[in-house]
Amino acid sequence: MLKSALGMFFSLMIAFVPAAHAKDAKTTSSKKTTASPTAKKSTAATTKTASSSKTSSKTAASSKKPVASKTASSKASKSNAQKTVASGKSKSSQTASLNSKEKLVKKSVVVNGKKQTVYDRVAKPAVPIVPPVMTAGDLAGLNLTRDPLALASNVALVMDQSSSDVLFEKNANVTLPIASITKLMTALVVVESRQDMHEMLEVTSEDIDREKNSSSRLRVGSRLSRANMLHIALMSSENRAASALGRHYPGGIKAFVAAMNAKAKELGMSGTHYVDSTGLSSSNVATARDLAKLVAAASHHPVLCQYSTDTKYVVEPGGHSLQYANSNRLVNNPDWEIGLQKTGYISEAGRCLVMQASINGRQIVMIFLDSKGKYSRLGDAQRIRKWLEETQPQNASRKVRTIES
């Protein structure tokens, strides 16, 4: 009985277990079937991504060779560029860090038996800041004077030589350094002393400029006639020639300077004083009115008119030729009819110019002192000439001002 009962129990269990497994399988399948749409989309997306990745991999694989080629080409170009700028790399890197006080110095050196170019950074030499030199006129405040023609010269005077009428003036009574305008008095004293113009004069160390340390084309030992010395002293303002003229005066340079001052007194040049025959010293002084008298007196000597207005002249000191040119470029201008002229410059005097010229049939004396700029005195002369031609003035103060010659 018992065996029979146990047999039935095991038979039921065997029948029940497969049925239970079948039920569980059915439930699991149902759950998979009823899964959410999101899960389905995710699965689809995953599938699509995988497919896309596979496609991209194929595409990349198919284009892998051209990309590699392009990269190789780029590397080659970069390498060539590096080689090209290799020589200037050091210079450019150093230049970028240079300041205004440094500069690069190129050097060639040998490294391991090979010549190479290197660049060293070195400091530039310090340049001292030199303040502008004020002229005697500026120090006296003459640069504050205004005039109707806006002249660049601090001092000016224009006179009709025939009538002695002063047609224009600006600070004309102020005594100022006159630089090489001094040489006009030097020439006047030489001519009126009637010295032998053919006598040979020699340049010595005494003629070297120790006042301004200016240069000269006449070497020590050069020999020229008195006439030639006078010619280049007037025309080109040759300092050693003017010095030699003074030294070869009877009694030497002291006697010559005394004669210059005596002549100035004779002409009524009360504001004038000379200390040498060149004008290199700022102690050679005069007023514009005084210089108008000097120009008028010098213009009576044809040799001074000729020498001062020649455009070029050749001398032969010591067997070699030297060509000199006129220091006043207006003598080359065909529009000007200049009878006598002299230029001058030292830092204390500024740019100076005196002239006698024919304008509209009138003999006009022009004096310009302490002008600024290399050509400003010539510009002032042009302005005065234009003013004279347009206005034809008779007298600056409506009355005659006599300037004796």
Image (cartoon, rainbow, N blue to C red):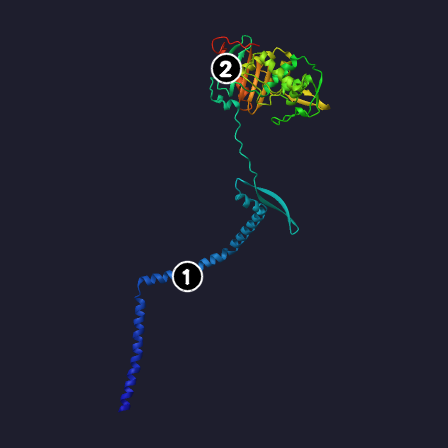
Say what amino acid the circle numbered 1 marks.
Ala
Residue 19 lies in what quarter of the image? bottom left
Relative image position of residue 332 (x, y in whole percent):
60, 18
Among all residues in the image, which is located at the extreme bottom?
Answer: 1
Say what amino acid the circle numbered 2 marks.
Glu
Q: Nearer the viewer, residue 281 or 86?
A: 281
Residue depicted at 72% across the width and 24% down the height:
318
Q: Which of 313 and 115 is in front in this view?
A: 313
The residue at which mark 1 appears reads as 50
Could you say which disc has been placed on residue 221 in the image?
Answer: none
Residue depicted at 50% across the width and 15% down the height:
169
> Seen in the image, is 13 located left or right of residue 108?
left
How far apart marks 2 and 1 lie (CA) works out to: 105 Å
Q: Counting other residues with Cα less than 10 Å from the Cα at mark 2, is it few (<14), some (14-19), or many (20 or more)?
A: many
In primary-sequence order, the first of circles 2 and 1 is 1
Q: Counting other residues with Cα less than 10 Å from the Cα at mark 1, is it few (<14), some (14-19), or many (20 or more)?
A: few
Relative image position of residue 280 (x, y in whole percent):
60, 23
Is there any visible trace of residue 310 in the rendered image?
no
Q: In which quarter of the image is the C terminus?
A: top right
Q: Nearer the viewer, residue 229 or 212?
A: 212
Check whether the beta carbons of the residues at disc 2 and disc 1 lie within 8 A of each other.
no
Could you say which disc has been placed on residue 169 in the image?
Answer: 2
> Seen in the image, is 100 located left or right of residue 242?
left
Residue 321 lies in what quarter of the image? top right
Residue 296 lies in what quarter of the image? top right
Is there any visible trace of residue 46 in the rendered image?
yes
What SS does tag 1 mark?
A: helix
